[in-house]
Image (cartoon, rainbow, N blue to C red):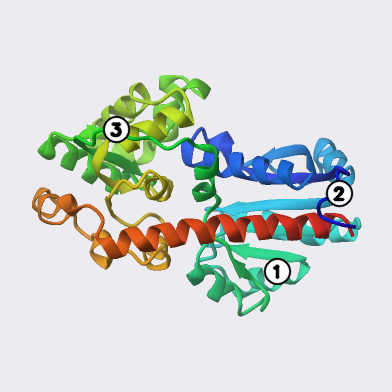
Amino acid sequence: MSTHSKKLIPVFIVNDTSADSHYGCYAVMNTIKFLAQKNNLDIVGYWPVHKEWYNNQTFNEKLLSSHLVIINGEGTIHDDLKSASALLELASYAKNLGRPTALINTGWERMSPNYGELLSNFELVSARDTASAERIRKYKNDVRTVPDLSIVSCMMIPEINVLRKSIGITDSVLTEKSLELFKLKKSLDAKLVSIFDKKKSTLLQFIRKGTSIKNGLMNPLEAIKSIQMRGELWSLSHSSLDEFIYDLSTLELLVSGRFHACTLSLITQTPFLAIESNTSKISSLIHDAQLENWRLVKNINKLHCHERGLYGWSLREAKNIRNYTLEAIFSAQKLFLDLRKLADQ
């Protein structure tokens, strides 16, 4: 059947990361929804990140009502995490019920070979960076590379032309690095940029999620600083993805430990410096987009920001970003055409 048919085909999306109340994840899920609709894929349900699917009646009903299970791997599959194994084991489970499974938008790092062997149960696998694809290729040769789907959200965001006039700093998924960035914010008198949506949590819930009682007892001073930082991040949260995108567009420089802050900086043309996250996803982004290596900094400081950070994009980088963004859009569209074909078999 032609992929241009108006027939709606039911698919089930697993690992909906928007449950993390994070605008980078919102951008990814918006792209999945947009491209699914464009290819007449009818999403019968979204299964949230962190929620177990084993022996769940609702999950089974959604799975059996779909023709294809699409797993959003995103930042979940690394370090042999329990959540990673659950996603990988799902393909075998779905296959036994006669439902094909695709793993898309995934990283792959520090995963044991026994998990790699589970990839044979997937009909289609798409990695979001070339390094992850190379690691996956040891187990599944036909893996493809499609840049992180948050980048494709540029198709849904109007172009913004505003005066860039400040330095912005985000947090990191790692508390220690977040505190380093928070300290840098004060020394630069920079603007704290929050990637979170506070509408889905209270201040207390947000602070609890980002702090550890055990670590707090071991280092009370660090705990106080972490609580202060989380409080500011919550209070400065935006009310929508569009507002967050606009905020990025006003910056002459972003300093970040957040992967999705960096991907969305590319589509807003906001120059950035970054420190690595819990995996090598930011360095992989810089490599694949062919940006200057110095944009990834091991130990960032005020002097480094002034010496390097205010250069803007070089002409070479600007050209490479345009090419990378176009490749992201083209390869994502091709991916969803193929997902349509897979669901229609």
Alpha carbons under labels 2 and 1: distance apart: 30 Å
- Residue 32, percent across and down? 64, 45
User: Which residue shows up at 45% across the image and 33% down it?
Assistant: 209
Q: Image height check: is 174 above or below 339? A: above
> Is 201 left, or right, of 141 in this rendering?
left
Alpha carbons under labels 3 and 1: distance apart: 45 Å
Residue count near mark 1 (Cα–Cα under 10 Å), binned few <14, some 14–19, many ≥20:
many
Q: Image height check: is 73 above or below 57? A: below
Q: Report the disc number at residue 151.
A: none
Report if the CB atoms under discs 2 and 1 are less than 8 Å apart.
no
* Residue 306 is at least partly visible in this image: yes
User: Which residue shows up at 81% across the image and 51% down it?
Assistant: 4
Query: Mark 3 vs mark 1: which is more N-terminal?
Result: 1
Q: Which dot, 2 or 1, sits closer to the camera?
A: 2
Residue count near mark 3 (Cα–Cα under 10 Å), binned few <14, some 14–19, many ≥20:
few
Give the image quarter of residue 190.
Answer: top left
For label 3, the residue is 162
Q: Image height check: is 88 above or below 165? A: below
Q: Report the disc number at residue 5.
A: 2
Q: Amino acid at mark 3?
A: Val
Query: Mark 3 vs mark 2: which is more N-terminal?
Result: 2
In which quadrant is the N terminus drawn? bottom right
Alpha carbons under labels 3 and 2: distance apart: 41 Å
User: Which residue shows up at 45% across the image and 22% down it?
Assistant: 239
For label 1, the residue is 119
Secondary structure at numbered mark 2: loop
Q: Amino acid at mark 2?
A: Ser
* Residue 279 is at least partly visible in this image: no
